[in-house]
Amino acid sequence: MGNLRKLDGPLLAQLWGAERVVMGMRVCKWIRDLLIKNAQSVLLKRAARIDTQRLGASDVSSDLVRFEHNEAEIRLVAPGCPELMEVILVGIHTAGRRLQGRVVYLDLSDNKMEQRALVQEGLLASMLGFCNGIVELNLKNNKIGPGGATQLARSIAHCSRLLSLNLHSNDLAADGAGLLATELQHCTTVEVLDLAWNKIGEVGLRALTAGLGELTKLRHLDLSGNEMECEGSKHVAHVLPRFEALESLNLSWNQIGPGGAELLASAVRELGQLKRIDLTGNAIQTDGAAHLAGALGECSALQFIGMSDNKLRDDGVGLVSCVLYQFSSLTHLDLSKNQVGAQGAGFVAEAVGECHALARLDLGRNEVGNEGLKLLAAALPSSSSLTRLDLDGNGVGPESVRALASVLRQCRALLALHLGNNCIGPDGATAFASSLPRSLPPALQTLDLGWCHLGDDGAVALAKTLPAIAHLQHLNLGGNDIGDEGAEALGHVLRRLQRLQGLDLSYNWLLCKGAAALALGVTQCSTLRRLELASNVVGDLGAKRLAWALGHAPGLTSLDLEKNSIGAVGARYLAMGVGAQVGQ
């Protein structure tokens, strides 16, 4: 406690980031007193369970009432900690009307309310009755169901300052959504509403949208994963034009199909302030893209377009690409998982040069192939703002990878390059590596070559040029059939990668010798925080070498050795290594 007294309030507040803090009653009370005096809020975060068995409801309610003396607004945060959540709810109920209008922020997400009888006992409604001044309410992932929605509806109409409501993943269903909408229409101050993954369906959406029409200040709306389909799209399309200030719209994973896309198109074109639209996983297909493309073209402020997993194919992507030049602020375009071939890649390549603000392009899990990648490579030099390029799983090989490498230096802003799950092979890795010194993006921080069949030869070739990537922080070489030879080459070069934070070599063929080389390299790479070695064959002797590294690499915070044929002997070595690291 003497050491703790040397810390001021704000520094003690940071202590709440610890995984678990167990203290005696006297220290608990002293820290709460100091936080109340200095931090202007009650800090009760999930990760900071201060021995909740010793922290009773009377203590919390006492803390809350004491805020009367400094007139501070109260923020309560307890995500993912059901025991502490119950303490907070009972504490608020005990403090009662003395908290009227004082609690402005309440985060009780991920607390499994449905399993703790809070809804059945009416505690949720009782608590909210004393929080009528709340500005932000987060009950995400609590599965409160229609019953919880009923309680929420009773109280929420009196929350005249409510700006943000998060009910993501609560199984509201049609009945719950309808009850909520009846009262939510009185909360005309709401700007952020998240009702994603609630199984609302077409019937529920009809009732919900009838009430949402009064929320004319709405800026962010998330209705993803609600079994909307085409019929539900009709109700959403009817209400959308009422939200003139809407900036973000998420309707992903609703299977609206081409018909739903046509219905939404007429409404979307009315949203002049729209900056983000996510239509991922909706089976829009080419016909739906034909309707949406023109509507999106009217939303000139768009910064993000999410169209992943929609079976657009080449023609659909071509239709979307035709309007991209109208978006001077577009920073992120996601067209992954759309069965896009070389022709579609060509359409995107033509449009990329016109999107001068584009920072992230995601074409992962398509079928662009070698010809498509060559077309994209030729267009990249004109994309001066591109920071992330994802071409994961596109059937590209050594020849096109060489073409890509030759133009990378001109992508001066590129921070992350994802080429995983492609048949690059040892030859492609060698060609890529040989091009890096003269064509390296100067700012590159993340390189993903996982599951690319590199083998030992590819790993050795790559290792020779890795030091040229001066800012490299994350390297993924998982699933590449790399054995001891490749691991040795990588281990020897680690000391020259003084910004590397994460290295993934999982799902390879590393044995004891390779583990020993990596262990030595880890001790010489002071910045390394995470080493992934799952599903190799390091065995007990390899575990011994890595345990030694743990004791000599205090910066390493994560080491994954799952499925490595490590027995009781290796486990003892690792336990001693962890003990040595903790003792430093």
Image (tube, rainbow, N blue to C red):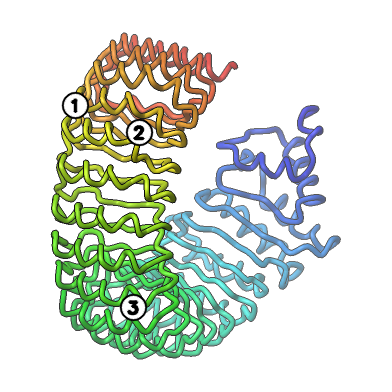
Viewer can see residue 142: yes
Location of residue 495 (image quadrant): top left
Say which residue label 1 marks.
455
What secondary structure is found at the residue carrying circle 2?
helix
Q: Residues within 10 Å of mark 3 (few under 14, many from 20)?
A: many
Which of pointers 1 and 3 indicates the residue nearer the eye? 1
In the rendered image, the residue lying farthest to the right is: 69
Please, what is the three-letter code of the amino acid marked with disc 1? Gly
N-terminal of the pair, mark 1 or mark 2, is 2
Say if mark 1 contacts mark 2, CB within 8 Å: no
In percent of the image, x 43 and y 81: which residue is there?
179
Separation of marks 1 and 2 at Cα, in angstroms: 21 Å
The amino acid at mark 2 is: Pro
Q: Residue 240: which quarter of the image?
A: bottom left
Answer above or below: position of 168 versus 552. below
Q: Name the one closer to the observer, 553 or 222.
A: 553
Q: Is residue 92 above or below residue 185?
A: above
Residue denoted by label 2: 437
Residue 175 locus on image (x, y percent): 36, 79
Type of amino acid under label 3: Ala
Mark 2 Cα-neighbour bin, 10 Å: few <14, some 14–19, many ≥20: some
Report the quarter where the N terminus lies: top right
* Image position of 335 (left or right of 121): left
Q: Is residue 147 visible?
A: no
Give me the disc on residue 174: 3
